[in-house]
Image (spheres, rainbow, N blue to C red):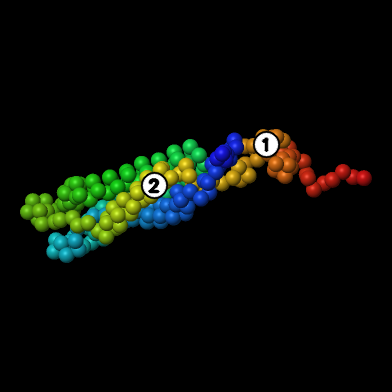
Amino acid sequence: MADRAGPGEAPVGATTDPRRRTFGRVALAGLATTGLTAFAGHQPMIRVPEEQLDRAGAMSVAGQELSQAEFPLAGALALVALACWGALLVTRGVVRRAVAVLAALATAGVLVVVAVGGFVQRDDARDDFVDQVGLTGAGGDRFTMELTAWFWVALAGSALALAAAVAAVRLAPWWPEMGSRYDAPAAQEPGSADAPAEERTNLDLWKSLDEGDDPTTGPVS
């Protein structure tokens, strides 16, 4: 007869499930790719080539600042996804999976923003630059916007980070979790019948500290 897990226990054989061993690799990949994407998301994504600025006499500091564009929304969403990965390491159960879903949604948002900004709105960025530097007509038509290396880093990083987040959504139920002993003492019932004697003692100690008692002061004989 097959062994059955008791209430609150992991299923028999869960510790040998290969999906459990994916935790470290997926979490590391998610943190690394999302962190790289967050950094790239705050860098210039498209710009006017310097040789075009030189020919147009727009090589001033102001001209250089106007000649490149960032995608702030991509950077902000990447930071949200990075925070989700941090929370995913310390959460459990349904909450952990919900955080993984949020990380996937935020990362998908980064991918969409970067792709649309680089491939669809590049001409709009060039028109804005031409208007701001006052080079309209035939002079403005000479300008083009090129994709920077940071654009490709953000695009590739967000795609890889999205894959890691989707993997986290699928695999989170089998990943190891922090034990309840790491929860705040207030989250547990002091004196619970299910808690070991040592844990009950520790909970009583925390409770006495909350009430202002000094456990180092014993009764005077």
Quarter of the rendering occupied by the C terminus:
top right
Residue 213, percent across and down?
77, 41
Callout 2 amino acid: Ala
Residue 203, percent across and down?
70, 41
CA–CA distance in space, label 1 to label 2: 34 Å
Question: Visible in this render: residue 212?
Answer: no
Residue 128, percent across and down?
19, 48
Residue most extreme to the right: 221
Q: For mark 2, give the secondary structure.
A: helix
Question: Which residue was labeled with disc 1?
Answer: 194
Answer with left or right where residue 49 lies relative to residue 220: left
Residue 220, percent across and down?
90, 45
Question: Visible in this render: residue 169?
Answer: yes
Quarter of the rendering occupied by the N terminus:
top right
Q: For mark 1, give the secondary structure.
A: loop
* Residue at screen point 47% across, 42% down: 173
Upstream in sequence: badge 1 or badge 2? 2
Answer with left or right where residue 149 lies relative to residue 24: left
For label 2, the crowd category at 10 Å Cα-Cα, with few meaning under 14, some 14 to 19 and many 20 or more, is: some
Question: Which residue was labeled with disc 2?
Answer: 167
* Residue at screen point 13% across, 64% down: 55
Answer with left or right where residue 110 lies relative to residue 86: left
Q: Nearer the viewer, residue 132 or 168?
A: 168
The picture quadrant where one finds residue 108 is top left
* Residue at screen point 19% across, 57% down: 146
